[in-house]
Amino acid sequence: MRKLAVILGALGLVSGAFGEESASTTGTPQGGADARKNLADFFLRTKGMTRVVSASEVSEAIRTGKSKYRVVDVRPAEEYEKGHLPGAINLPLDVLFRPASLEKLPATGDPILLVCHSGHMESMALGGLAALGYEPYVLRFGMIGWNAETKVKVAGSPGQSPEVVRGLGGPIEK
């Protein structure tokens, strides 16, 4: 069911991304066939699985300076300002597929790590970016996963205790 939601969300986002382009005589936006091919190729390469990266892997890569991902936080600006991964840029989902936002992304082929609060919005963004030819990955459980797996205080959250994780049915004492 989650795969279906990701695919439907991706097609909806891609439709919106091409919505400003002129339509062909069949009513299909220009580039729509490319988007469908890119999405089909992406799911063929990934065997229909979402590419998930653990917070501990990302944290270690950031700590050692060997991160291969461009981190894109798709949450609204207000949430991003309350705390985000080090080095992340904020491109909220509602503007992510606008030309000005797409220009801020790395070249197609370079890995992008998408982040949101719980993993839901990043999964929708994954499908849309895959349809446009990007190489997106998602952070497992979003910021909830980051806070649970790492002791790294996210930027902008000075009051967060690294010893207590909230939001996972807890608090959970480490």
Image (cartoon, rainbow, N blue to C red):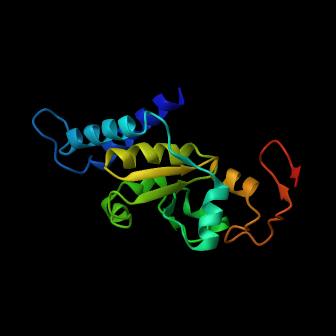
Query: Compared to 84, does 169 lie above or below?
Result: above
Query: Compared to 39, does 162 lie above or below?
Result: below
Residue most extreme to the right: 173
In the shown orientation, is residue 166 left or right of residue 127?
Answer: right
Percent of width and height locating residue 2: 53, 31
> Residue at point 28% right, 37% down?
36
Examine the rendering and report whether any part of residue 84 can be seen. Answer: no
> Residue at point 33% right, 44% down?
131
In the shown orientation, is residue 132 left or right of residue 170?
Answer: left
Percent of width and height locating residue 106: 37, 65
> Residue at point 73% right, 67% down?
152
Q: Quick one: 1 or 49, which is closer to the camera?
A: 49
> Residue at point 45% right, 46% down?
126
| Tag count | 0
In the shown orientation, is residue 97 left or right of residue 147?
Answer: left
Q: Quick one: 52 or 91, which is closer to the camera?
A: 52
Examine the rendering and report whether any part of residue 169 can be seen. Answer: yes
Quarter of the figure that contains the C terminus: bottom right
Percent of width and height locating residue 24: 12, 40
Q: Quick one: 99 or 149, which is closer to the camera?
A: 149
Residue most extreme to the left: 25
In the shown orientation, is residue 15 left or right of residue 112?
Answer: left
Percent of width and height locating residue 85: 61, 65
Snapshot quadrant of residue 64:
bottom right
